[in-house]
Amino acid sequence: MTDAAPLDCSSQQRNDTSTPAAAAGVKEAVGRSVDGHRVLLVDDQPMIGEAVRRLLADQADMTFAFCKDGSKAVMTAEEFQPTVILQDLVMPDIDGLDLVGQFRSHAGTEKIPVIMLSATEEAATKAQLLEAGANDYLIKLPHQIELIARIRVHSEAYKRLLERDAAFGALERSLAELTREREKSERLLRNILPDPIAERLKNNVSTIAESFSSVSVLFADLCGFTTFSERVDASQLVDLLDDIFSAFDHLANAYGVEKIKTIGDAYMAV
């Protein structure tokens, strides 16, 4: 077991086995995967903290931290990023039921499994805690085998939940990017082609061309444009063409004419 305990919540100090860099690494891992099992015990009695630490001491894949100040438990959990929280029911500075509610109301701890520890085994108390969001309930001090087994079960379930949420998040981002690219492609397509043709391409219609027995083709250009363009500033020329072709577009729409394209000063429609 990697020992990050005893963690004094009042001073937020750890021994050398749990460095800020290691904590940052765990935070980066949340949402993808977390190596091993990180166990945070919240209990006002250091004696219980030491007892639990010893129960987990021979578990090489477990990192343990102890918080004796219940009022700082949420802050400690957000920093330590446990995969399981062991929490005492009766503490002098905070009600155990209220603390479960605090864990469930904070984004950084809302999904972390909480295993309650208590000297009482009243069914009504268990029901209240489970309704408040606790995941399990153990009589303290539990047998080592049972404690380790429950920690592993809840920790593994939580890590699978993180991986699932990360996969869903990646899928949502990919779908959003795909939607943006599709919308971009459709806008580009409709800028190049008439709407009916663009719609057929979008719907994978094999034949996109329309057939007419006879058509009239309009091909117009501006007389003297080449000479005129040599005497006018480029930006003014572009603005002038934009005004002229906008007027053409308005007339085309008004008379049901289909604009095909513009090339330089030329305007083609059918």
Image (cartoon, helix red, strand yellow):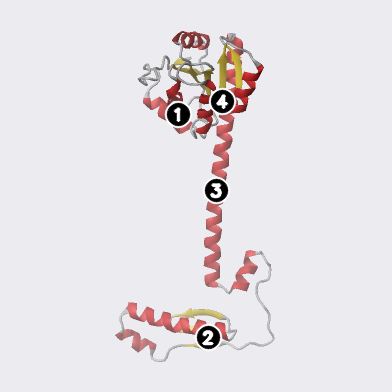
Q: Residue at x 34, y 80 (%)?
A: 236
Q: CA distance from mark 2 to mark 3?
A: 43 Å
Q: Residue at x 68, y 67 (%)?
A: 205
Q: Earlier in the sequence, mark 1 or mark 4?
A: 1
Foreground pick, 87 / 197? 87
Q: Is residue 229 above or below residue 5?
A: below
Q: CA distance from mark 1 to mark 4?
A: 13 Å
Q: Earlier in the sequence, mark 2 or mark 3?
A: 3
Mark 3 sits on what residue? 174
Q: Earlier in the sequence, mark 4 or mark 2?
A: 4
Q: Residue at x 42, y 14 (%)?
A: 6
Picture coordinates of residue 72, whole percent (x, y): 42, 24
Q: Residues within 10 Å of mark 2 (few under 14, many from 20)?
A: few
Quarter occupied by residue 122: top right
Q: For the residue labelled by badge 3, is the local secondary structure a helix, a strand or a loop?
A: helix
Quarter occupied by residue 136: top right
Mark 2 sits on what residue? 251
Q: Is residue 73 above or below residue 261?
A: above
Q: Residues within 10 Å of mark 3 (few under 14, many from 20)?
A: few
| Foreground: disc 4 or disc 2 | 4
Q: Quadrant of the C terminus?
A: bottom right
Q: For the residue labelled by badge 2, is the local secondary structure a helix, a strand or a loop?
A: helix
